[in-house]
């Protein structure tokens, strides 16, 4: 398909979208980064890569005016998004997505650590303070309990909150990366250069994600022993399990989308059904467990020979 001739109005709008997206990435990454991705992709796929790079530079500079520390995140994130736009037409979307998740995770941790350093403290101290605040909030909800069972439950919740914070960075990066790729696919289609990305119902992650899950489970089990590194084993194991659980959730979403596609459910119905299932996963882990089982059961009967192709069938639905 030929690329439509770029129009000045479109170029300006995409330029502005990139800059605004960079600014919104500071307070709302799940909104700002996809907006910036759509702007960058729209420019790059209209052969305006230099213009896109200039827009990114201006966006980073604008963030730097607001917060020098968060400009670290903006610079890293926009660079990663720019490279994602360039690489998606040439590389497996799973490889590109994994790299994007890694960069966004590290950039978030680095920028928060720098903010804490500039405030005269460190990231661990900030986490400890937020955990203490969470404890007081839980006690307030429980009406300042005195019973041993309630206090023990609050203590366990506090231990979980204080130990699981690294996984929160990973989870945010995963969801931001999904939205960035979706925005890039949308912009590519609008630019006349559709990308060969699998339909959501055909999403099938590599079975290699099971290895960190197994390692996490073993470390959690080992943490109940009495040895000097038991708490470290607990923290590492817990975060491995929580991070991979996010990937199992995505696999479960793919299973659900595949079932809905085969049932002939329309776009609106699919969105509502997937949103309801995602909400149900919070208390029950239903989708996450489905995603885990799918690595063995293969609910959608997908062809997994070689597992190298990430291209949807010609008549498959796109993201």
Image (tube, grey):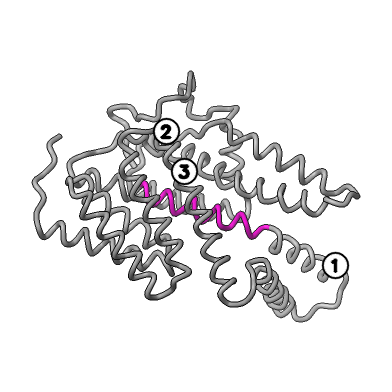
Dot 1 corresponds to which residue? 149
Q: Nearer the viewer, mark 1 or mark 3?
A: 3
Whether residues under marks 2 and 1 lie with C-beta atoms below 8 angstroms apart, the answer is no
Work out whether residue 129 or residue 200 is closer to the camera in this orientation and state it: 129
Q: Is residue 111 left or right of residue 202?
A: right
Q: Is residue 214 left or right of residue 303?
A: right
Residue 171 place in picture, x, y as percent:
54, 53
Dot 3 corresponds to which residue? 99
Work out whether residue 181 or residue 98 is closer to the camera in this orientation and state it: 98
- Tell me what residue is drawn at x 29 percent, y 65 percent: 58
Q: Quadrant of residue 188?
A: top left
Farthest residue toward the top? 305
Dot 2 corresponds to which residue? 202
Which badge, 1 or 3, comes first in the chain's sequence?
3
Work out whether residue 186 or residue 94 is closer to the camera in this orientation and state it: 94
Q: Is residue 43 left or right of residue 224?
A: left
- Taking 131 as reference, is 110 above or below it? above
**Helix, strand or loop for the magenta stretch, by majority:** helix
Q: Residues within 10 Å of mark 3 (few under 14, many from 20)?
A: some
Q: Which residues are magenta?
A: 164-181
Q: Was residue 90 drawn as part of the magenta stretch in this picture? A: no
């Amino acid at each position: 398909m030929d690329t439509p001739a770029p129009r000045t109005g479109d170029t300006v709008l995409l330029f502005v979208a990139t800059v605004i997206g960079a600014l919104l990435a500071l307070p709302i990454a799940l909104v700002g980064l996809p907006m910036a991705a759509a702007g960058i992709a729209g420019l790059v796929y209209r052969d305006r890569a230099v213009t896109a790079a200039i827009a990114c530079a201006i966006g980073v500079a604008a963030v730097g005016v607001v917060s020098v520390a968060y400009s670290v995140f903006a610079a890293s994130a926009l660079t990663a998004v720019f490279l994602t736009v360039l690489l998606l037409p040439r590389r497996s979307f799973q490889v590109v997505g994994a790299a994007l998740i890694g960069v966004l995770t590290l950039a978030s941790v680095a920028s928060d650590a720098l903010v804490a350093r500039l405030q005269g403290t460190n990231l661990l101290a900030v986490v400890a303070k937020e955990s203490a605040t969470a404890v007081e909030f839980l006690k307030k909800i429980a009406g300042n309990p005195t019973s041993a069972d309630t206090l023990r439950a609050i203590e366990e919740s506090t231990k979980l909150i204080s130990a699981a914070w690294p996984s929160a960075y990973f989870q945010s990066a995963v969801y931001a990366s999904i939205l960035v790729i979706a925005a890039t696919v949308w912009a590519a289609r609008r630019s006349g250069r559709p990308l060969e990305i699998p339909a959501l119902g055909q999403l099938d992650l590599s079975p290699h994600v099971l290895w960190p899950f197994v390692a996490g489970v073993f470390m959690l089990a080992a943490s109940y022993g009495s040895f000097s590194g038991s708490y470290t084993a607990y923290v590492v194991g817990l975060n491995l399990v929580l991070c991979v659980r996010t990937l199992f959730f995505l696999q479960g979403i793919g299973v659900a989308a595949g079932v809905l596609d085969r049932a002939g459910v329309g776009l609106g119905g699919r969105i509502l059904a997937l949103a309801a299932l995602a909400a149900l996963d919070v208390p029950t882990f239903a989708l996450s467990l489905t995603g885990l089982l799918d690595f063995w059961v293969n609910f959608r009967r997908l062809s997994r020979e070689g597992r190298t192709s990430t291209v949807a069938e010609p008549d498959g639905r796109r993201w």
